[in-house]
Image: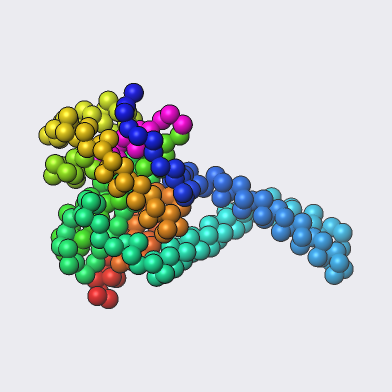
Amino acid sequence: MNDLPPAPAPEAETTPPPARRPVSLYLSTAALAVSVIALGFTALSLGGGQDFGSRVRTYLIENPQVLDEVIQAREQQAEVVRVGSIDEAIRANPALLAADPRDPAFGPADAKVTVYEFFDYRCPGCKAVAGQFRALVDANPDVRFVFKDWPILDRGDDTTSQYAARAALAAHQQGKYLPVYTALMAEPSLTPESIDAILVSQGVDLARAKAAMVSPEMTRHVTDIHTVAAGLSLHGTPSFIINGKASPSIDPAEVARLIQAARDKA
């Protein structure tokens, strides 16, 4: 058991990107079926013959890759809409990404390029890209990287994501954020006990950290991160924002490309 206060309720979708594809697949396939039926009725009304729907069905069975192409196109379209909604939210309220001295941030305060990562330590996608993202931090000393610990994967009495976020932010108060971030992302099965062990292994004063984790100030900080994420219309973790523009991909290579594009434009 841990003594964390109740976590703020997430105000955005809490499923990480890798877990969203089955839903998207279902919706895309269902939409395609509806479209085929509608097309059949249209063909009938235009004199296309009663066997038109059967011919379409046969074609799709014989060429299933068409379904994959449709699904991919729908997902790309949905991603464009998602990115556009985030960019519009930033344009409408740039204060959402105003510098917050409580956030772990690395790189020059006056950097021409600033990268935000919103993440959860139990998010599979976050864990998958964490190593490469850390490499981006090291490879771009002229860029400001801001870490937004956004614990959204807790359910019911399970507050492990909240515990991990608070532990990392408490480690930041002791100057140990990046090594703790790296270790938490590398741990495949986080528990309060394994998180405590990581803090100790990285030289964090555990008693001091635990006091910080349950403080009202920590609760306000984590709540404010939830509020910012909701204001940005973020749908999941990880989410990357580079100079006020959302990345359409969680791939660090795409983030690197956007960093260079922002650097060239600055």
Identify the image quadrant of residue 43. Answer: bottom right
> Which quarter of the image is occupied by the N terminus?
top left
User: Which residue is painted at 31% across and 53% down in the image?
Assistant: 117
The boundaries of the magenta stretch are: 156-168
User: Compared to 256, does 4 lie above or below?
Assistant: above
Please indicate, yes or no, whether residue 124 appears anywhere in the rendered image: no
Q: Residue furthest front?
A: 216
Q: Residue at x 39, y 38 (%)?
A: 7
* In the displayed structure image, the side of residue 185 where residue 238 appears, left or right: right
Is 93 positioned to the left or the right of 164 in the image? right
Q: How many marks?
A: 0
Provide residue 218's location: percent of width, then percent of height: 27, 42
* Colour theme: rainbow
Q: Quadrant of residue 165?
A: top left
Residue in the picture at 30% in, 37% down: 164
Identify the image quadrant of the C terminus: bottom left
Q: Nearer the viewer, residue 33 or 244?
A: 244
Residue 9 seen in this snapshot = yes
Quadrant of the rendered image containing residue 198: top left
- Residue drawn at x 17%, y 30% as measured from the top left: 206
Could you say where residue 229 lies in the image, as x and y percent from the top left? 39, 54
Toward the top, the furthest residue is: 1
Whether residue 159 is in magenta: the answer is yes
Decide whether residue 126 is among the magenta residues.
no
Q: Main secondary structure of the magenta part?
A: helix
Residue positioned most to the bottom: 265
Percent coordinates x, y for residue 220 in the rendering: 31, 46
Residue 240: percent from the left, percent from the top? 34, 57
